[in-house]
Amino acid sequence: MDDTLHVLILAAGKGTRMKSAVSKVLHTVCELPMLEWVLLAAEALRPASVTTVVGADAEAVRTAFGGRSGWAVQDPPLGSGHAVAQALPALTDRTGDLLVLMGDVPLLTAATLRRLADAHRAARPAATVLTATPADPAAYGRVLRGADGRVTAIREARDASPVELAIGEINTGIYIFALDALRPRLARLQPDNTQGEYYLTDLVALLHGDGLRVDGLAAADPAEVMGINHRADLAAAEAVLQGRIIRHWMLAGVTVHRPDRVWIGPHATFEPDTALWWDVTVSGATRVGPRCELGPGSHLENARLGAGVHVEYSVIRDAEVADGTTVGPYAHIRGGARIGPANRVGNFVEIKKSTTGAGTKAAHLAYLGDATIGAGVNVGAGTITCNYDGVRKNPTVIGDGAFIGSDSILVAPLTIGAGAYTAAGSAITTDVPPDALAVGRARQRTIEGWAARRRAKLAGAAAPPQPGPKEPKPSQR
C-alpha cells in the first residue's frame, strides 16, 4: 500500500447527454460500468484511500460498488472544484498527494497513472496536470504554459480567447495535488465564469500566482483520456477497449481471423492455439481451453470449454463442454449443462441442466432437459425429454450405450437402462430395463387400395355437372 497516495474520483455529473435514467458512470463499456474501469486503474496503484464524489443518483452508485470506495455527495453540482471540496472532510487527517480522476474516463490505464504519480513525486511540484494533444481539441480546456514550460493556467474552452483556443494541448481533468497545497486554496475558488461554477482548473492559476510550481505531463495516447458524454462516445470507447483486449489475446497465442468482427469480454480467458472466426462473442467468466475452434456465429457466456472443442453458430451459456466435443451448427447448451468429452451436439439440439458421458451423440433436433445421460449414448433426431409436468421439473436418466430412436418422447421421471433401445416414434412413460427394447406407439394398419379409392372419389366430387336437354323456344313449339 502507498500510504501517502489518496485517490478522489469525481462522478457526480448528471450526464444529461446520455438521455438515460441510469447514472452515467453506471453505463457499461465492455460489460463493466465505466466507473469500474476507473476504479480498477486506481486500485492498481494500491492507494491508502479511494473516495468517490457522487450526485443525485448517489444511492445507485453506492449500491453498485459498495465498500470499494469512500463516498462524498455533491448535490447540487456546482463544478469540479466544489466536488473536491465536498470530499476534503474525509481526508482531514490525510497527508501526501491527492490523485483526482474523472469517473467517465474508462480508457485510462494504470500505467499512465503510475507514470503521472512517479513524475509528480520526482519533481515535487504543488500539482501535476495530465495533458494530451488530441487531433481535435474541441471543447476541452486549454493548457497555458509560461516561457519556462511550467503550467500557468487552464482555460475552459467556453471562456477561452481565440488565441487560447488555437492551443493544441488540453486538460484531461486528471491531476495530482500535494494535499498541503490544495487545502488552503480550495476556499479561494470563485464562480467567475459563464457557468457560475467553481472550477478545479482555477486552482492551477492560484497555485502559480502564489509562486508554486505546476507541472504538466502529456499522456502517451490521447485516446486514454477520452471522456464519455453520450452514447456515441460510449461506442467509441468500447471499440478502443476491444482493440486492447483482442490484441492482448493475439499476443498470447490466440488466432483472431477478423478482429473487427469479434467481441471478447474483459474476464474471458483463452489458452494458446485457439482460433476465433468472425461474428464470435465471448463474454462473462468464459474459459476456453487450448486448440479450440470458435467458428462463425459462436456465442459463449460464462462457458467453460476443454481442449479441442469446436463450436459453430451456437450458444453456450452457463455450461461446460469437455475435450474434443463438437457443437453446432445452431445448438443451444445452457443452464448448468455439462457435456462430456468427444460428444457431438448437432444442429438444433438444446441441452439444459443435463450431463452427458463420453462419446455421446445428439446430432439433430432434440431437447434434453434435466437429464443424466451416460457414455456412448445415441440420441435420435426429434427426441425430447418431457421434464416439466406443469408444477415441477422431473429427471430423466439414460444408461451407458443406450440407443434412443428418432422422435422418441421420454416422459419424466424416467430411467432407461444401459444398452436399452427405444423404438422410433415412441412415447416412453415407464422405466426401461437394461438391454430391453421399448415400443410405445400404435400398431401400424395397412389398408390396401385405400388411396386409389380416395382419389377416385375426390375426382368424382370435383367433376362439373353435365348440362341437360335445352328447353325449346316458343316459336319451335
Image (spheres, helix red, strand yellow):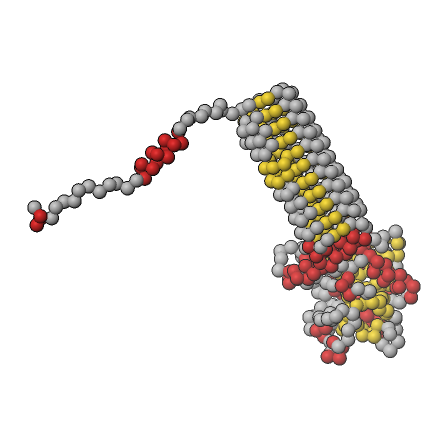
Q: Position of residue 422 (x, y in %)?
A: 59, 25
Compared with residue 204, is residue 293 higher up or lower down, i.e. above or below?
Answer: above
For the view shown, which residue lies furthest in the right direction?
122
Quadrant of the rendered image containing residue 374: top right
Q: Would residue 379 be seen by someone viewing this image from the given angle?
A: yes
Residue at 65%, 39% (x, y): give it. Answer: 333
Quadrant of the rendered image containing residue 445: top left
Comparing 110 with 388, the one in front is: 388
For the view shown, which residue lies furthest in the front direction?
476
Q: Position of residue 385 (x, y in %)?
A: 59, 31
Q: Position of residue 344 (x, y in %)?
A: 67, 36
Compared with residue 178, is residue 156 higher up or lower down, i.e. above or below?
Answer: below
Residue at 80%, 61% (x, y): give it. Answer: 100
Quadrant of the rendered image containing residue 57: bottom right
Residue at 85%, 76% (x, y): give it. Answer: 146
Q: Position of residue 455 (x, y in %)?
A: 37, 35
Compared with residue 343, is residue 156 higher up or lower down, i.e. above or below?
Answer: below
Residue at 34%, 37% (x, y): give it. Answer: 459
Q: Would residue 391 be seen by someone viewing this image from the given angle?
A: no
Comparing 322 with 8, the one in front is: 322
Comparing 246 with 224, the one in front is: 246
Q: Tell me if 418 is positioned left or right of 476 in this view.
A: right
Q: How many marks?
A: 0
